[in-house]
Amino acid sequence: MSARIIDGNALSAKLRDQLAARAAALKARGVIPCLAVILVGEDPASQVYVRNKVNGCDKAGIRSLHDVYASDVEPAVVFARIAELNADPGVHGILVQLSLPARFDAAAVLEAIAPEKDVDGFHAENVGALMQGKPRFIPCTPYGVMKMLESENVPLPGAEAVIVGRSNIVGKPMAMLLLARNCTVTVCHSQSQDLGFHTRRADILVAAVGRARMIAGDMIKPGATVIDVGINRTADGKLCGDVDFESAREVAGLITPVPGGVGPMTITMLLTNTLEAAERLLP
């Protein structure tokens, strides 16, 4: 058996066409959706992520603001800029690219963003709303994963879902979203005993730990849906996920590739959240 691939690029392109139509409808009513992105430092990966987000905005008809600061910038400067963007009615979404230099209190930076403009969904108020099952914004990567599962009509109620990774960005919100869809959810992490025991029970397996190819084919239940969130660079410079794709595809029923899987969906859902923030302001 060879798994069917869930093509994140194709699904993302389809959704972005819909987003462009929504952005045009907003503009016809006098609202220009706008996303402000703040980057601190010169990390090459972060620069690529920000460039992709800005390009995504342009193609979807969303205005973007792009503030770049040197790594030695005083945190007060960044906080002041966030305050300006919070107060600007023409800005609907604010994103501070992580990670930040070590001397920044990342949690304080995220909390400084107005909850109604926190399109990443990381503010404590928005995290709490997600926990209660009434999210204002869904964190972009888990949101994208849910869209991929929906696009393939993956049965969710009663399914055994195993998430490998417990980060605030992916693992924890992913668990909340799957619970809300009536899955039975197990969250594994670095202290979990016998990881393979858990992963082999999974009808839906989400790998999000940042360790190259740690999930091999013999750790996967035959026919399972495997979502690979990891993005790792190997010694030869190639990108790979947390799942050993070649062995896993011979066991799984559905699988996402890296690259071309979850990554494009993350940016698409960021644009979706920005449009939703703007649409909420309509009379």
Image (cartoon, rainbow, N blue to C red):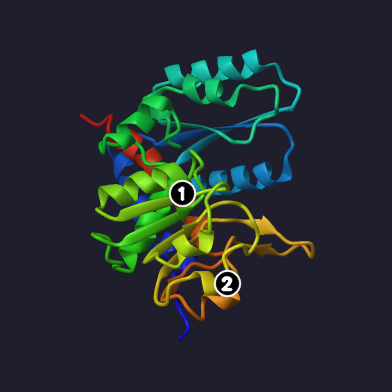
Relative placement, left or right, of 216 versus 3 is right
Q: Residue at x 51, y 42 (%)?
A: 167
| Residue, far right | 236
Disc 2 or 1, which lies upstream in sequence?
1
Q: Quadrant of residue 183?
A: bottom left
Examine the rendered structure and indicate whether residue 216 appears above or below residue 49. below
The location of residue 94, given as percent across then percent down, is: 48, 30
Question: Could you tell me how far apart the alpha carbons at marks 2 and 1 are, in whole angstroms?
Answer: 20 Å
Please say if the residues under marks 2 and 1 sit with CB atoms less than 8 Å apart.
no
Q: Residue at x 41, y 28 (%)?
A: 117
The residue to which callout 2 is attached is 245
SS under mark 1? helix
Q: Amino acid at mark 1?
A: Thr
The numbered disc on residue 141 is 1
Relative placement, left or right, of 21 versus 200 is left
* Tally of numbered tags: 2
SS under mark 2? helix
Is residue 80 visible to the viewer in this orientation of the structure? yes
Q: In terms of depth relative to the viewer, which is nearer, 260 or 181?
A: 181
Examine the rendered structure and indicate whether residue 22 appears above or below residue 227. above
Location of the N terminus (image quadrant): bottom left
Examine the rendered structure and indicate whether residue 124 appears above or below residue 148. above
| Residue, far front | 193
